[in-house]
Image (cartoon, helix red, strand yellow):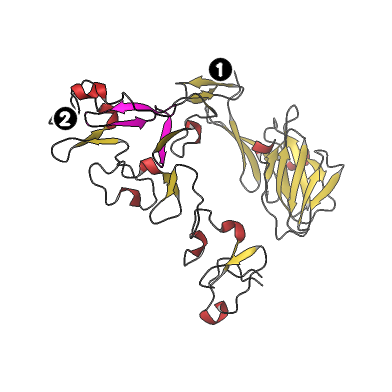
Amino acid sequence: MSHCAEPPFGVKLTVSEASTLKCPSTHVACDDGSRCIPTNYECDHDFDCDDHSDEKNCSGCELGKINCPNSPQCIWSENVCDGYPDCPDQSDELNCDSCSNSSLQYKCEHGMQCINLTSVCDGVADCDDESDEGIECGAMCGNKKCQSPSYCKPTPRYSVCICPGGHHRFEIGSKVFCQEVNECNSTDEPKCSHICVNEPPGSFTCSCRPGYVLLENKYCRVKAGVPEAQLVFETRDQIRSFSLESKNNVLIISVPHDIWDLAIGPLPQENVYWTDVKNHAVYGIPRSSVNATFQQSMVRINYGLLYPVGITIDWKANIMYIADSGRKELIACSPTGRTCTIIQKDLYKPRSLTIDPDTR
């Protein structure tokens, strides 16, 4: 691959253009020479080159996992032919016979019937020919050694090391290993509404943020006595609040010019702020206001701004951030607007912005 200017990422070149393609040091060329992609796009389990060359010769799967047959996505080896598709194209469930996943299933002695390995030698016949039970069950684990936490599971014909609940099973050579499952990282439906803590194998605990109570060990609901949640929104020339339970829709203020963005400041003042591109300004008003007029609003910043289109407020630091599309800048100001600092310059049409709560 050649490392060396780059066409726009995602634009396919003609054959003649591809033959002279050079990439900057931070990018790599696809094998067919059609485009450059960032080097960190290689082996990221997603096809970025048309010829899929960015995902070849990759061994990016963690221990115990394998690539899907037709994609770079990694899945647990035990999930192949387990009756549930895990690959995007379901290719992990193709060309499977009834007992393809021998590590989890047991083939009855007569016919093609297959049962779950945990149902073998449990005192209850699950095979139609009852070949999953018998006196041989008691003798199969005599000399079998399994590495903890795996344990020996007998069958009438052989024994095998399996993993307890809450673990993935995988093999390296002749050895069986178990890796604990973190239920909180499940890609299926979230385990908890707010906070999930992984517990000893096979379990997890849910909890709620302050001001909420836990229901059914999963869902979080606002505590009784806490003011009902409200949405504050703008309708071009009005700012309104909507109560989620009582459904009350209240006018906070009417303004003569278009509102581009709004934000709410922290307690105790809890002011509502909005940007006004026509007046090149940021205004504010107490959140508790009802049917207020524009004359009652407070000018926060009305100098130095060109097109203030975006606004957000960091409640912990009590800092107002403004995206000015005209100045091509991000600006940090005190809520009073008395002091402001440019924190980023030369941006192409900055618009909306918000604070990432996970970093606060």
Residue 137: x %, y % from top left: 23, 24
* Magenta segment boundaries in residue numbering: 146-173
Amino acid at pointer 2 = Ser
Q: Give the SS element for disc 1.
A: loop
Q: Is residue 258 left or right of residue 112?
A: right
Q: Residue at x 65, y 43 (%)?
A: 238
Residue identified by numbered label 2: 131
Asked if one can make out residue 97 in the rendered structure from this viewpoint, the answer is: yes
Q: Residue at x 52, y 70 (%)?
A: 31
Closer to the camera in the image, 75 or 104? 104
Q: Residue furthest front?
A: 143
Q: Residues within 10 Å of mark 1 (few under 14, many from 20)?
A: few
Residue identified by numbered label 1: 224
Q: Quadrant of residue 80?
A: top left
In the rendered structure, are the residues bearing label 2 and label 1 in contact, judged by CB atoms less than 8 Å apart? no
Taking 198 as reference, is 256 above or below it?
A: below
Task: Please report whichever mark, 2 or 1, sits nearer to the chain's N-terminal start.
Answer: 2
Q: What whole-number distance in Å separates the C-alpha atoms at marks 2 and 1?
A: 59 Å
